Amino acid sequence: MIRIFKVFVPASVVGLLLSETLLVIGCYVAAYALVGQDYLDVFLFFDGGMDRIFFVAGSVLLGVYLNDLYSELRVISRLRLVQQFCLVMGLAFLAQSLASYVLKDMVLGRWHMMVGSGLAIVILPLWRIAYDVWFIRSRNRQRILFLGANKLVKRIVRTIHEKPQFGMSCVGYLSDAPGGDDFSGSVPFLGPVSKLKESYEQLKPSMIVVGLPEQRNRTPVDDLMGLRVSGVRVEDASYLYETMLWRVSLDALRPSQLLFSNAIGPNSRNLAIQRLYSTVISMIGMVLALPLMAIVWLVVRLTSPGAAVYRQRRTGLNGKEFFVYKFRSMYIDAERNTGAVWAQKDDPRVTPVGRWLRRLRLDELPQFFNVLRGEMAIVGPRPERPEFVKVLSEQIPFYNQRHAILPGITGWAQINHKYGDSVEDTITKLEYDLYYLKHLSLSLDMYIIFHTAKVMLLSKGSQ
């Protein structure tokens, strides 16, 4: 796996992105060679042809990303794959149409665009199918031997089976007791932990992942040390969990990691940079969004009684409470009889217009004011209501660690998990928040902001 923007990405995804970039560029270069009226080298290097091809290639790759074709690499339906690439090319033609108004130097000729896109619609799906068969499903797979069968190991095994793009396979697991139904038929049980050396000599795995309780009499330290010194890769299950799922496991997190390590905790330099660009982005965003905010304010006022903007008490940095501003998406006095309750699917408290505001994340626009006031950042953990914080901090260990940084309008948990309506969802979101707290940086924030734009555009991930 390769680390990009503080996120571990499977090498197969990076390889696919690079190969498709070359293929898309090649399609439009070949198209000009077929239908162009000038010499190819003159067009590419003296007539701005490469700039135009890079522009259209960028729009194609953006369309591939927006269709989640880099999130799921398996080809489940070839017909659906072709349909998705037709949508991608539609986005490329739309980008060319817009460019004809504002960036005329970036527009390709009519036949050049049509022939190049036609080649891409044929070549890219065929390459996807070939890549899936040759690289995702069969070649260069890391063979993993698990030592133990705890919750982390079981979650890692499920992820390996669900996402073959990680290029991993499970050769078996060693445990003093079988792992139960979670492993039935998927990962062979090889016997007790004491058979580690024997199992390694027989299977020759490329990695050993340890998921045993921290008890010296149960962990074969000498055997593991001997294998590690001989060049065998040995990893803790918590590391692989974080790498593959982009979360910090609460089950594996210990107080000593927080007390004596810099692994979890904000860096003052990164926090200062975050505060600076949060202020700049919120000022620019507020100016650009003012016309849209005026329209939303008017629509909310006309469709349901009550103020269009409301404020709600939330918990922020170091547990300090503040009022967050939002466009009202619920009926007035929606919680009069129930008190504070979590948002839920098909929430009856939400107005018809409010459903669209939440789906498009437009109800969050007034929070730019909170950012300018220093109460929030653009990116950070979602600010929770004090009523929930009190209960959750008593039920979930390390919950208050998320208050070590400013809450955000968007965040790592928001783009990777749905709105929580249970303690289990909150635990999952906290694992994402701890990952963000550990890896907070400008590059990760830019990744989150870019992905948030995708979520807003496609109306995904909100409730």
Image (tube, rainbow, N blue to C red):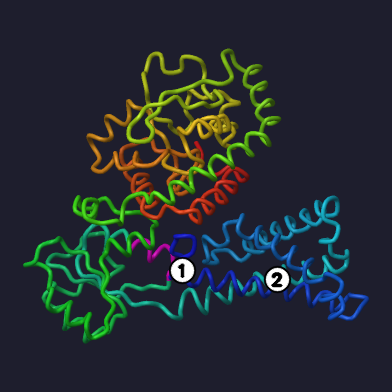
Q: What secondary structure is found at the residue carrying circle 2?
A: helix
Residue at image location 32% in from the left, 80% down from the top: 206
Q: Is residue 368 above or below residue 27?
A: above
Give the main secondary structure, helix, strand or loop, of the magenta stretch.
helix
Q: Position of residue 296 (x, y in %)?
A: 65, 26
Which quadrant would the N terminus be assigned to in this image?
A: bottom left
- Residue labelled with disc 1: 10
Q: Is residue 263 above or below residue 347?
A: below
Say what amino acid the circle numbered 2 marks: Val
Judge from the rendering whether residue 141 lies leftward or rightward of residue 213; answer left or right: right
**Which stretch is magenta?**
157-166
Q: Is residue 253 above or below residue 116?
A: above
Judge from the rendering whether residue 289 lies leftward or rightward of residue 72; answer left or right: right
- Residue labelled with disc 2: 24
Q: Position of residue 283 (x, y in %)?
A: 61, 37
Q: Is residue 160 magenta?
A: yes
User: Residue 249's image quarter?
Assistant: bottom left
Residue at the left extreme of this rendering: 217
Circle 2 Cα neighbour tier, 10 Å, few/some/many (<14 / 14–19 / ≥20): many
Sequence order check, earlier mark of 1 and 2: 1
Judge from the rendering whether residue 349 lies leftward or rightward of residue 61; answer left or right: left
Residue at image location 30% in from the left, 57% down from the top: 263
Circle 1 Cα neighbour tier, 10 Å, few/some/many (<14 / 14–19 / ≥20): some
User: Residue 292's image quarter?
Assistant: top right
Residue at image location 65% in from the left, 58% down from the top: 62
